[in-house]
Image: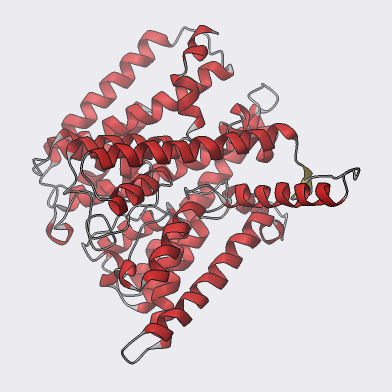
């Protein structure tokens, strides 16, 4: 992983041919450090047996994400930006976790190599998240992910060929959609540089932009294209692979896909009607629907783009966007959040409890996408939900203890755990950034982003004393 990361660190300088890479030395030093550590690890451990037991997989998964986030921040820290270690780590973590929150301003005039590195970070974070979902989290039985286990989620000699086939398919689909996004943006009027950056961050549902205005810099056509690519990035990529192998229709037969698309069909329409009702000025329905659909999609998919300050659309919109931050995309996508399937499982449990009250002796079955839902999956999902709300409470209290106002503390905690990007309020809302926050708050939020990306339970387990005593 370290060697691959060091190779990616050289890409901003290579792509810009050095002419627009004033931080080439920072990237070279960062790549040398990371590559050196990677080679050292390979040389000192290549003869050791690889025993992929769950205990080692937990440690590998959690430690690799935290360490890669640290290494990803090196180019920012060594660059001409002259930012603190907290700022650099926050930016690197936000990139690799595809959160999209930023401490940087003046993006329109920023060095292009750093802008490109931010986008590349989110792109490699996106494919890393997909791979983690397909091969690791179901195997580790984290947060109800066992529901999506396949033969490729088992780490056995028999399953490894299937895992390699699926991995190649996922990479082909991910790269293909990324190329299509870049070319589409370019054909619609973006410069090639802007198109390349936004193409990478759209499919990765990352949200980093090349302008302080984010996507507000571009026209309605580009907003609609970005909406489409954000939706694609939030759908299960393993279903795209199955479609590619001839299993036509599996994507739209999936329950979480149908609910996800229903949310994006209903919520923007209702919110547009609300904006029309409260608008004191003449209302352009087409433009406002495009803006509403784009910003709702950006929050639900945890991308973090913004075309305007949606927190100023009125009290209902403010509250609605807060709750939309919880939702997230589908499992097996690059999106964060609590994921659609957990809300659907909660509805299944609610229905079951209501039926038991009416018919105490009834024999009820739980099915999701044609598969039986075991008590183990339900217990894991409930545990995840509880620990998510507990972490939300603790991070909010920690931020409030740093003298941040309630809206900033609560939305900041929520947006870090769900990897959305912008929060709410004047400081960290769509029109602001996380730069004014104290360094201590940035460290806390950085850990929150990593915990949210790792489905929280993975981190909690590794930190528990019982894990190390076993």
In which quadrant of the rendered view does residue 446 lie?
A: top left
Specify the quadrant that holds the N terminus: top left
Residue 343 in sight from this viewpoint: yes
Give coordinates of residue 41: x percent, y percent.
35, 15
How many circles with numbers are drawn on the protein? 0
Vertical order, 180 against 413 (above or below): below
What kind of colouring is applied to the model shown?
A: secondary structure
Front residue of this view, candidates 362 and 202: 362
203 horizontally vs 252: left or right: left
Front residue of this view, candidates 106 and 241: 106
| Residue drawn at x 34%, y 61% as measured from the top left | 305
Give coordinates of residue 371: x percent, y percent.
78, 44
437 horizontally vs 321: left or right: left
Residue 75 in sight from this viewpoint: no
Give coordinates of residue 226: x percent, y percent.
41, 66
Q: Check the image and name the residue furthest to the bottom.
A: 282
| Residue drawn at x 47%, y 13% as measured from the top left | 465
Front residue of this view, candidates 277 and 267: 277
Give coordinates of residue 136: x percent, y percent.
56, 31
| Residue drawn at x 40%, y 58% as measured from the top left | 202
Vertical order, 193 against 451 (above or below): below
102 horizontally vs 182: left or right: left
238 horizontally vs 119: left or right: right
| Residue drawn at x 50%, y 28% as measured from the top left | 458
Front residue of this view, candidates 420 and 436: 436
Specify the quadrant that holds the C terminus: top right
């Amino acid at each position: 992983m370290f060697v691959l990361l060091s190779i990616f660190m050289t890409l901003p300088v290579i792509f810009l041919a050095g002419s627009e890479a004033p931080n080439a030395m920072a990237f070279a030093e960062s790549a040398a450090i990371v590559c050196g550590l990677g080679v050292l690890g390979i040389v000192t451990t290549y003869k050791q047996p690889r025993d992929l037991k769950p205990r080692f997989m937990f440690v590998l998964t959690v430690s690799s994400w935290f360490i890669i986030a640290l290494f990803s921040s090196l180019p920012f820290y060594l660059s001409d930006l002259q930012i603190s270690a907290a700022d650099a780590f926050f930016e690197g973590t936000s990139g690799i976790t595809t959160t999209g929150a930023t401490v940087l301003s003046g993006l329109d005039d920023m060095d292009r190599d750093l802008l490109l590195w931010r986008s590349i970070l989110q792109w490699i974070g996106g494919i890393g998240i997909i791979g983690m979902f397909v091969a690791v989290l179901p195997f580790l039985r984290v947060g109800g992910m066992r529901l999506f286990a396949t033969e490729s989620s088992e780490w056995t000699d028999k399953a490894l060929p299937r895992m390699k086939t699926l991995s190649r398919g996922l990479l082909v689909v991910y790269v293909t959609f990324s190329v299509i996004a870049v070319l589409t943006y370019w054909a619609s009027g973006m410069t090639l540089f802007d198109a390349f950056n936004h193409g990478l961050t759209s499919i990765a549902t990352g949200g980093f932009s090349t302008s302080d205005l984010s996507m507000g810099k571009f026209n309605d056509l580009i907003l609609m294209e970005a909406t489409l690519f954000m939706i694609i990035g939030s759908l299960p990529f393993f279903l795209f692979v199955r479609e590619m192998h001839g299993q036509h229709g599996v994507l739209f037969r999936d329950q979480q896909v149908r609910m996800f698309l229903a949310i994006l069909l209903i919520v923007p329409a209702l919110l547009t009607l609300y904006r029309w009702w409260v608008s004191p000025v003449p209302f352009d329905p087409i433009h406002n629907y495009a803006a509403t659909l784009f910003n709702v999609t950006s929050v639900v998919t945890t991308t973090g783009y913004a075309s305007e300050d949606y927190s100023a659309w009125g009290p209902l919109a403010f509250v609605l966007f807060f709750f939309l931050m919880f939702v997230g995309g589908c499992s097996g996508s690059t999106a964060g959040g609590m994921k659609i399937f957990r809300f659907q499982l909660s509805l299944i449990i609610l229905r079951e409890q209501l039926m038991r009250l009416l018919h105490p002796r009834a024999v009820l079955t739980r099915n999701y996408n044609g598969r039986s839902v075991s008590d183990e999956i339900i217990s894991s999902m409930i545990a995840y939900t509880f620990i998510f709300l507990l972490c939300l409470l603790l991070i909010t209290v920690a931020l409030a203890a740093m003298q941040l106002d309630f809206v900033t503390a609560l939305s900041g905690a929520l947006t870090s755990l769900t990897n959305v990007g912008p929060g709410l309020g004047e400081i960290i809302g769509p029109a602001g950034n996380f730069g004014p926050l104290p360094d201590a708050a940035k460290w806390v939020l950085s850990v929150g982003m990593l915990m949210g990306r790792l489905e929280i339970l993975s981190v909690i387990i590794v930190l528990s004393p019982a894990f190390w005593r076993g």
